[in-house]
Image (tube, rainbow, N blue to C red):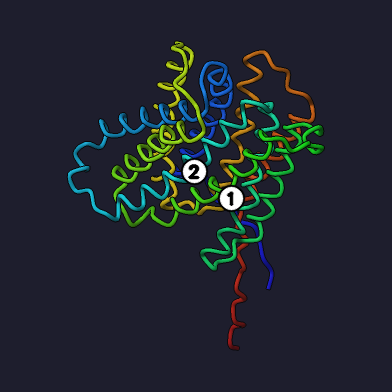
Amino acid sequence: MPSRLRWMRLRPQELALIAITAVWGATFLLVHWAMEHSGPWFFVGLRFIVAGLISILIFHRSLRGMTWADIGAGASIGLMIYAGYGLQTMGLQTIESSTSAFLTALYVPMVPFAQWLFFRRRPPVLAFVGAGLAFAGLVLIAGPGTLSLSLGLGETVTLISTLPIVGEIILISVFANRIDLGRITVVQLLTAGLLGFATMPVVGEGVPQFSWVWVAAAIGLGAASCVIQLTMNWAQRSVSPTRATIIYAGEPVWAALIGRLAGERLPAAALLGGLLVVLGILASELRIVRRQRRPDPIE
């Protein structure tokens, strides 16, 4: 039977994910600056405690009906946030941001397979095409030098951070329509923050010397984290993990644009990579619709 491609317009949920991905991309530069004045686990703890307190102010009324289901779902997502952001922040102490972006981007092609594994539902073919295009674009953005890595501690922990990032996206989709949006946002943010602080004595990290750099960065990123997690929880009620991941793949593109405004040059290969990421996002928005053959009229 013949088939045709039908364009799917971006819905408000998808536009919201694109917006928070732009904010997400800007955080790379801020975290890099903050790591010059703070340890990774203290900064992660403070960042998400601030985000949790902001979310409490927003959702304080709904907290009265907190259930164990809300706590369990929020804590599990918070654990993934803590591990993903913590290890990524730890890696940024010793590796360049472009290398970190490339390594972190490995979660892009992993999510469709994780969705297939856990949901027993094979993603559409074009979702895999979109993931492949996005990943190829991210390689170009990072630069050819990132393909010949010597895996030190920074590269290793950043690679490991991709696993909880995948877990976060999958868990948000699992719980999105089962629990209260405000309660799960509060619990997951506070969980990530408390675990960040709890990790400090384990790894021997002390409280850093006071600096307005990490104070301002933690408050700003805390507010951004609250908005990002709230939007993800809301949008992924109707956006599949695979499609959401393709949108999130634009994070390094936004990071490169922010870097350009900060004085970094964007090479031609990176521009081509950005184009491939956009094409990957567009490919994920296409659907193959089969047209059923009408029965011949009876003469």
Q: Nearer the viewer, residue 119 or 80?
A: 80
x and y percentages locating residue 284 in the rendered image: 61, 50
Q: Which residue is mark 1?
A: 285
Amino acid carrying mark 1 in the image: Glu
Image quarter where the N terminus lies is: bottom right
Tell me which label, 2 or 1, sits earlier in the chain. Answer: 2
Tell me which corner region of the image, top left, top right, bottom left or bottom right, holds residue 260.
Answer: top right
x and y percentages locating residue 142 in the rendered image: 73, 32
Distance CA(mark 2)–CA(mark 1) = 10 Å
Q: Is residue 293 left or right of residue 244?
A: right
Amino acid carrying mark 2 in the image: Glu
Judging from the image, what secondary structure is the residue with disc 2 in? helix
Labelled pair 2, 1 in contact (Cβ < 8 Å): yes
10 Å neighbourhood of mark 2: few (<14), some, or many (≥20)?
some
10 Å neighbourhood of mark 1: few (<14), some, or many (≥20)?
some
Q: Which residue is mark 2?
A: 14
Image quarter where the C terminus lies is: bottom right
Tell me which corner region of the image, top left, top right, bottom left or bottom right, holds residue 139.
Answer: top right
Judging from the image, what secondary structure is the residue with disc 1 in? loop
Q: Residue at image x 33%, y 46%?
A: 184
Q: Nearer the viewer, residue 42 or 102?
A: 42
Q: Residue at image x 39%, y 33%?
A: 226
Residue 1 has which mark?
none
x and y percentages locating residue 24 in the rendered image: 52, 31
Rendered position, 108 above or below 95 = below
x and y percentages locating residue 49 in the rendered image: 36, 30
Q: Nearer the viewer, residue 22 or 296?
A: 22
